[in-house]
Image (tube, rainbow, N blue to C red):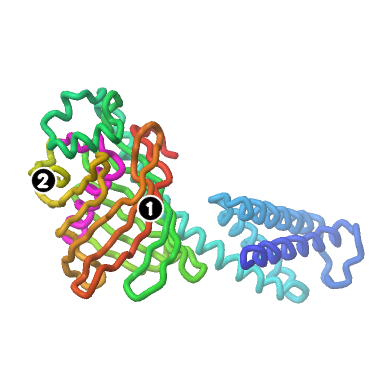
Amino acid sequence: MAKIGFIAIIVIHGLIHLLGFLKAFQLAKINELTQSISRPLGILWLMTALLFVAAVIAFAFKNDYWWAIGLAAVLLSQILIITFWKDAKFGTIPNLLILIVALLNMGSFLFERGYRLDVQSSLQRSQSAATEIITEADIQSLPEAVRRYLIYAGVIGKPRVANMRVLLAGEMRDKGKDYFPFTSEQYNFCDEPTRLFFMKGKMFGMTVPGYHRYKDKSAMMDVRLFGMLSVIKLTGDVAYVADTVTLFNDMCLFAPATLIDPRIKWQIIDEQSVHATFTNNGISITAVLYFNAEGQLVNFVSEDRMAVADMKKYTWSTPISRYQILNGYNLPAFGEAIWHYPDGDFTYGKIEIKDVEYNIRDLK
């Protein structure tokens, strides 16, 4: 409803600018405009109207650059309004509204652009990564439960994974609060372990983007309202350890082929569970992986993540309850993210895996 109202404001405001053009070229009698308008200025009134029309079309079709057109329209419009202040001063009100919305969208665009530039640089670096075909011999040293999982996932006879792109959707929440919907896109890279995760949440009708950046021996979680106003920002060792756990979780759930990585050390617990230690840049994290008789990974449990809410470590798990075929692989379809607090389990994420692609060459 708000979107329709905003579109209506731009359309009406843009059409009003046509009055200056009509008066300048004496195409209609416009009593509301008492000041004379020259033909060159009439052309500017027409150009402004066309800019608003272009902006509203771009906005309606969700073009990422609509805000730039909108800002140009508002700037030209306000110059004309100041020039003809006596007749046009009330046009400042819709200009202010359009300006605010355009600036907020610009903030989100620029915030996401930083993520996309990071992805682009990592894609360029990973172009030469090896993608030989995985054979039975490549998985022989793995625990039996892990071998069954890789065979079930369908990695044998397919290329090694140099990078992946994952699309997710679902609901998330903070403790004591309601769920909010989100969508996310992420790129992970294996040659130099990298995780670039960009999420768009909807809270109270507002877009709240968040960027998790695990790259170049550092990690950052940055959540901003409209990409401008900081809500949460976490960096340093706590963020790096947490994202190392999450990176390994991604490997296990989204890219089983990466479990042949020599940076992983395995210890068998029993026929359907193993203990794993993953080391990157001198940081080692651990997790227990649980499998069922069919060969599916059904849970990932780690003690090494720290909850942002109170900066304390709790058991963290991501149980999987459904599988699907994606691009020729058997991969998870639905999972949850759970903190196991002393006062009870807290499910803070319900996640649908929408798509997983491997060995991406170009930014999408």
Q: Amino acid at mark 2?
A: Asp
Task: List x then y, in percent, for residue 82.
Answer: 68, 70
Q: Quadrant of the N terminus?
A: bottom right
Boundaries of the magenta span: 237-261
Q: Which residue is mark 2?
A: 270
Q: Which mark is residue 104?
A: none
Residue 60: x percent and y percent?
64, 54
The residue that label 1 is drawn on is: 198
* 92, above or below 326, in the image: below
Position of 68 with respect to 110 (left or right) is: right
Residue 206 seen in this snapshot: yes
Q: Is 58 on the left or on the right of 160, as rendered?
A: right
Residue 292 found in image quarter: top left
Q: CA distance from mark 2 to mark 1?
A: 37 Å
The amino acid on which the numbered mark 1 sits, given as a three-letter code, is Phe
Q: Is residue 279 above or below residue 94?
A: above
The crowd level at tag 2 (other Cα within 10 Å; few <14, some 14-19, many 20+) is few
